[in-house]
Image (tube, grey):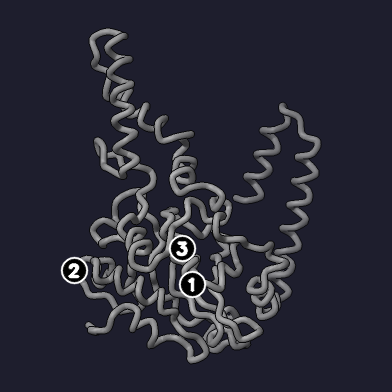
Amino acid sequence: MSSSTFSQELEKRLPPSLSLPAVLIKAMDWLEANGGRQTERNGKSLDFEDQSLALYPIDDWTQPGTTLSAFDYYGPFYLNGGPRPVADEDQRVFLFLRTGGDGSYAGLWLDDAGKQQIVHHGSGSGSDWWGVISDDPADLLRLIAIGYEEPAFREIHTKTAQEAALEMAGFDSLFEMAHIMAEAQSAGAEDPEMFHRRKEQLAQEFAARLERGEDILGDTAPCVPPKAFEAFLRCELGIDTPDRASDVLKPRPDHQDPFALWLQTIAPPMDAEAQAQLDEMVRNAETMASDLDGITSDQAPTLMNRLKGLFG
């Protein structure tokens, strides 16, 4: 096993045209010193390419509600497929931060003017966010410190991490979640008045504990932000964490984003079969849109069966 730190291993793999910002190195070194580096799985040592550097100590990272974000080496970036790139993307893109369970990553990009940018590369199968995050690497740290389970999905960026997690879990608020838990625990109360009083007291207590990220009766809060990491950023690096990603990130539409546009220019041309499949998907989507415009309530089951048949 190498004695190099996680950040040093990343630097060994950086193309010469890019450099790892000092603020990111400091953050990674702190995370590693505080137990965030995963170097083995099931008792077996991992090669660096399979390691992760979490925003929590590794033992805490497995609890529900923690973010999936972690420093994680993507490998050489070959948009056009291996073994060799058609363009110079392997020298201009370096991805090293996983932002979702779908294969989305963030990292560095050297733009056409020779300036290093922080960018996001969505997987396409899940996240469709391809774009510049910022030219300030501190903004990448702000994004992951918020605590979104999967910051790869830009539609949640106008919400707090807790709001996004509660919405995903089907709750309107943390108190609603606590109320449901309290009702289950209060079922043995002897009379309705006692039941109501006990339920309200328990709900308030549970809500406060969930807010702190505590485990209650086997259920944890839907969102457990990396609070120690957030405190480190604030106290040691002077980086405040926003409530919402939209407080600091101002992404452009894809047709205006320089990274998204650059990716389009280096994308491999479609072969005839792929183009035919895409054309058919477009026609099917247009047909469905037309059907939906004129659908009545009693026709809905028939259309749903057609949709199921189309998508298997």
Disc 2 marks a residue whose amino acid type is Gly
Q: Which residue is mark 1?
A: 137
Left or right of residue 13: residue 188: left
Label 2 crowd bin: few (<14), some (14–19), many (20+), radius 10 Å:
few
Q: Nearer the viewer, residue 46 or 8?
A: 8
Disc 1 marks a residue whose amino acid type is Pro
Left or right of residue 264: residue 125: left
Disc 2 versus disc 3: nearer the observer:
3
Q: Nearer the viewer, residue 162 or 274?
A: 162
Q: In the rendered image of this protein, does residue 73 appear above or below residue 160? A: below
Q: Which residue is mark 2?
A: 43
Q: Between disc 2 and disc 3, whose residue precedes?
A: 2
Disc 3 marks a residue whose amino acid type is Thr
> In the drawing, what numbered circle is on residue 99?
3
The residue shown at (48%, 65%) is: 103
Q: In the rendered image of this protein, does residue 229 appear above or below residue 179? A: below
Can you name the residue that lies furthest to the bottom here?
Answer: 16
Q: CA distance from mark 2 to mark 3?
A: 26 Å
Q: Between disc 3 and disc 1, whose residue precedes?
A: 3
Label 3 crowd bin: few (<14), some (14–19), many (20+), radius 10 Å:
many
Left or right of residue 211: residue 18: right
